[in-house]
Image (cartoon, grey):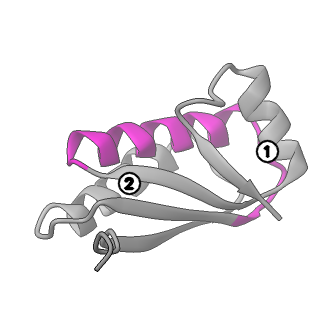
Amino acid sequence: MGAPEPSSIEFAVGGTIARADVPRLCDALRLLLEPRKIEVVICDVGALVRPDAVAVDLLARLQLTACRLGAAMRLRDASAELCELIGFMGLCGPLTTRRR
């Protein structure tokens, strides 16, 4: 008998992210995580349009929100452009990505 699969949820981030969206999206993730014991948040970023510094800031803040509530966060379907930007900003360790 192996180790149990970690409990996980999916959280999608798409479109163009404005700085004003950051608190609302962090609150939405917090509300999803607080009532349950979730170990991994799979953040689907495949629908992000033109990733920029604001989008990376959002992802870093989402990761902090998840971490504070005991969950790890993994990015799914990150574009090459987003992966390069995350690397340029020095966040490759904290923001684990799986490319398209």
Which residue is outermost to the right? 80
Q: Residues within 10 Å of mark 1 (few under 14, many from 20)?
A: many
Q: Is residue 67 magenta?
A: yes
> Which residue, given by chain and number where applicable, does mark 1 sit on?
82
The quadrant holding residue 83 is: top right
Q: Which mark is residue 7?
A: none
Residue located 30% across and 72% down the image: 7
Amino acid marked by disc 1: Leu
Amino acid marked by disc 2: Arg
Image spot of residue 52 (x, y percent) = 76, 38
Which residue is outermost to the bottom? 1
Of the pair 39 and 89, the residue shown nearer to us? 39
> Which residue, given by chain and number where applicable, does mark 2 sit on?
24
Q: Which residues are magenta?
A: 46-70
Residue located 54% across and 43% down the image: 59
Q: Residues within 10 Å of mark 2 (few under 14, many from 20)?
A: few
Q: Is residue 65 magenta?
A: yes
Image spot of residue 58 (x, y percent) = 53, 42
- The quarter of the rendered structure image containing the N terminus is bottom left
Label 2 close to label 1 by CB (< 8 Å) = no
